[in-house]
């Protein structure tokens, strides 16, 4: 089953757990998606194996960046009507605070959607949404 078919099924059933069960990248990192107040929230579950610095212990920046990019792609795929997967053109990640080994949540905001390109901003946080761990700005190719 394709990524877009999984998104359609998740939208129809209002159950986004199908994504984390069937997309290998999400399953490997422990990324889950759920709806909260009309927004899609993407969560990286706490896992000591994702540590980049075991002495603090802190999450590896690549895992944080992966969560941010996945949140943007899932939001774009959820919002669009076509069956084409959004493709990353470029992303810029700003690491703002230490991401400790606990659940990390992200929400994406599509700031502009053109016919060919979409701009997305994503923020992730752990305990307080007002204190983001990292943010991302990305451009995605829309077919």
Image (cartoon, helix red, strand yellow):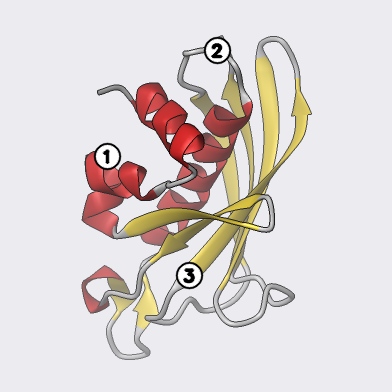
Residues at marks 1 and 3, CA–CA distance in whole angstroms: 19 Å
The vertical placement of 42 against 112, above or below, is below
Left or right relative to 113: residue 96: left
Left or right relative to 64: residue 55: left
Return the residue at label 2: 82
What residue sits 53% from the left and 29% below the top? 77
The vertical placement of 68 against 19, above or below, is below
Pick the residue in front: 58 or 105: 105
Return the residue at label 1: 23
Left or right relative to 126: residue 38: right
Reading the chain from its start, which is encountered first: label 2 or label 3?
Answer: 2
Callout 3 secondary element: strand
What residue sits 56% from the left and 9% below the top? 143
Residue positioned most to the right = 112
What residue sits 36% from the left and 56% below the top? 31
Q: Residues within 10 Å of mark 3 (few under 14, many from 20)?
A: many
Residues at marks 2 and 3, CA–CA distance in whole angstroms: 30 Å
Return the residue at label 3: 104
What residue sits 29% from the left and 60% below the top? 30
Q: Position of residue 61 (x, y in %)?
A: 42, 63
Which is more foreground, mark 2 or mark 3? Answer: 2
Q: Residues within 10 Å of mark 1 (few under 14, many from 20)?
A: some
The vertical placement of 6 against 29, above or below, is above
Callout 2 secondary element: loop
Q: Position of residue 83 (x, y in %)?
A: 47, 13
Reading the chain from its start, which is encountered first: label 1 or label 3?
Answer: 1
Q: Position of residue 33 (x, y in %)?
A: 45, 52
The vertical placement of 65 against 139, above or below, is below
Which is more foreground, mark 1 or mark 3? Answer: 1
Q: On the rendered image, what quadrant is the N terminus found in? A: top left
């Amino acid at each position: 089953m394709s990524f877009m078919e999984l998104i359609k099924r998740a939208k129809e059933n209002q159950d986004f757990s199908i994504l984390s069960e069937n997309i290998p990248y999400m399953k490997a990192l422990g990324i889950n998606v759920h709806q909260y107040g009309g927004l899609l929230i993407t969560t990286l579950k706490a896992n000591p194996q994702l540590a980049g610095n075991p002495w603090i212990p802190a999450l590896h920046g690549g895992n944080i960046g992966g969560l941010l990019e996945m949140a943007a792609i899932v939001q774009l795929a959820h919002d669009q009507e076509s069956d084409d997967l959004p493709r990353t053109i470029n992303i810029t990640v700003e690491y703002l605070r230490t991401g400790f080994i606990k659940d990390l949540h992200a929400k994406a905001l599509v700031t502009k959607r053109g016919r060919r390109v979409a701009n997305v901003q994503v923020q992730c946080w752990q305990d307080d949404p007002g204190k983001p761990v990292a943010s991302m700005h990305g451009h995605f190719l829309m077919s």
